[in-house]
Image (cartoon, grey):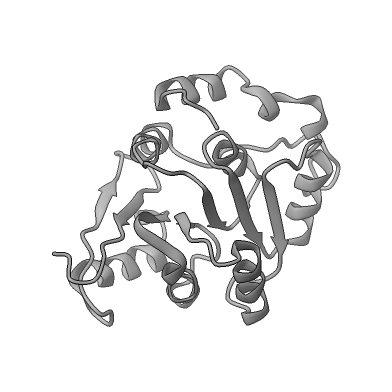
Amino acid sequence: MSELSSEELINGLKDGWGELNHPSLVTPFVGQDAKQKMQIQQKTEEIRAFLDVVLGLEHRGFVLETGLGRGGTHLLWRKLFERVISIEHDYHSVAAFLFALEEPRNSTILWGSSINPSTVHKIETILAGQPLDVLFIDGNHDYEFVKQDFINYSPMVREGGIIAFHDTVSEHGPECFVDELRTGEGVERACQIVDIHSDDGPGISYYVVKGEGSP
C-alpha cells in the first residue's frame, strides 16, 4: 500500500502514473474507440480531499466500489488498500479492464448487478467475515439502486470505516438518497454527512460509521 500523500498520488496520476499510462491499457474492447484508455472519472480537487480522509484511516484492508467505469479509480484504490473489490454490470467494461490488467494482485472484479442477491453473497464469501474499511457507491445512479447498494453493503463496513457516494451533485439519485441519510428520513438515525463539492464537480459525500450508542 502507498504511503504517498494525496497530493503525490494525484500528481502521479497527472504525470501518467504507473499502470494508468501502460500501453496495454489501449484495448479494442471499450466502445468504438479502440484507443480509449482507463481514466479516473473524478474531479481532481474532490478526489484529493477524499484521499486525505482515506489516508487518515488506521487500517486500510478492504474497499468495495460499486461501479468500475473505466477502471481508473480501482487502480487508485490498489495503491491504498490490501484488497480492492469492484462490481460492474457492463460486460465490456469488465472485459477491457481484465484484459489490460497484467497483475491481478489485490484486485477482484465481479461482473453483474450490485443489487442481485447472488452478488451480495459473493461479496460476503470474499470477505469471509472480515469487514470493509471503505464502501464507495458509484454504480447505477438511479435512486433505488443507490439505496439498495447502501442497504446491501453498509452493514459490512466496520465501525470507524467510511461510506461514500459519488455524483451527489450531478446525479439526482445519489443526491436524494444522501439527503435522506442527512436528515434521518427512512433510516434508523441521521448520519453526519460530509460533502466534498467543487464548483463544477460531480461531488463526493461521505460519513464515518459510528458504533451503536455513539452520537
Left or right, 95 with respect to 126, comes to: right
Report the residue that reaches farthest toward the left.
215
Q: Position of residue 102 (x, y in %)?
A: 81, 36
| Residue 10 higher or lower than 87, as above or below | above
Q: Position of residue 199 (x, y in %)?
A: 29, 39
Q: Residue shown at 68%/38% (left/top)? A: 38
Tell me the quarter of the picture where residue 41 sits.
top right
Q: Residue shown at 39%/60% (left/top)? A: 158
Q: Count up the numbered dots.
A: 0
Q: Residue shown at 78%/55% (left/top)? A: 92
Residue closest to the eye, 27 or 205: 205
Residue closest to the eye, 16 or 150: 150
| Residue 33 higher or lower than 110, as above or below | above
Report the residue that reaches farthest toward the top.
15
| Residue 165 higher or lower than 42, as above or below | below
Q: Position of residue 126 (x, y in %)?
A: 65, 63
Report the residue that reaches farthest toward the front.
129
Residue closest to the eye, 185 or 160: 160
| Residue 210 higher or lower than 143, as above or below | above
Quadrant the C terminus occupies = bottom left
Q: Residue shown at 31%/60% (left/top)? A: 209
Quadrant the N terminus occupies = top right
